[in-house]
Image: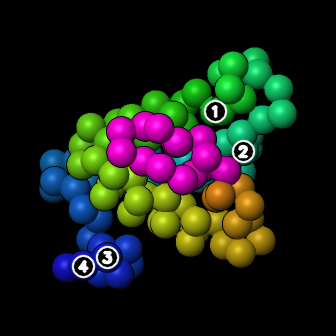
Amino acid sequence: MGFWGDLFGTAPCPAENKAELDKLVSELLAIARQDDFLSEHPGGAFNVQCKHVRARLIGQRLDEINGVELMDWTFEKVKKKLGKKENRIAEHLGYCWNDLGQWKY
């Protein structure tokens, strides 16, 4: 289907993982709106690198399901759903996931 077809259509993941993917995307959106993906200080929901622990676990799970292709699709989906006003927060997700699987931001 290609990048844009995947971006705006079907996610590049097995059919049996679609429901899980929907939940993970929803969870990432909730994290973005509630906590952000990065912090100035470690502690609580953030690890010693000031990255959101649950968001990183979600990234690891996406990598397990279908690697960087699914991570990229999810990143773009979250970015689109957050919109231009919250684009900075979406960019934080890219940094939060750095070095997970083949992800480089």
Kindly report the distance in space between the C-alpha atoms of the residues bearing marks 3 and 1.
Answer: 27 Å
Residue 19 seen by the camera: no
Residue that appears at 65% across and 58% down: 91
Q: Which residue is mark 2?
A: 36
Q: Amino acid at mark 4?
A: Gly
Mark seen at residue 52: 1
Q: Give residue 18's position: percent from left, percent from top.
A: 26, 54
Q: Give residue 35's position: percent from left, percent from top.
A: 74, 40
Q: Is residue 65 left or right of residue 82?
A: left
Q: Earlier in the sequence, mark 2 or mark 3?
A: 3
Q: Which residue is mark 3?
A: 3
Q: Amino acid at mark 2?
A: Asp
Crowd tier of the residue under label 2, counting other residues whose Cα lies within 10 Å: few below 14, some 14–19, many 20 or above? many
Q: Is residue 93 left or right of residue 102?
A: right
Q: Amino acid at mark 3?
A: Phe
Q: Is residue 23 above or below residue 5?
A: above
Image: magenta residue range: 92-105
The answer to whether the residues at label 3 and label 4 have Cβ atoms under 8 Å apart is yes
Residue that appears at 39% across and 63% down: 73
Q: Quadrant of the N terminus?
A: bottom left
Crowd tier of the residue under label 4, counting other residues whose Cα lies within 10 Å: few below 14, some 14–19, many 20 or above? few
Q: Earlier in the sequence, mark 1 or mark 2?
A: 2
Kindly report the distance in space between the C-alpha atoms of the residues bearing marks 4 and 2.
Answer: 30 Å
The answer to whether the residues at label 3 and label 1 have Cβ atoms under 8 Å apart is no
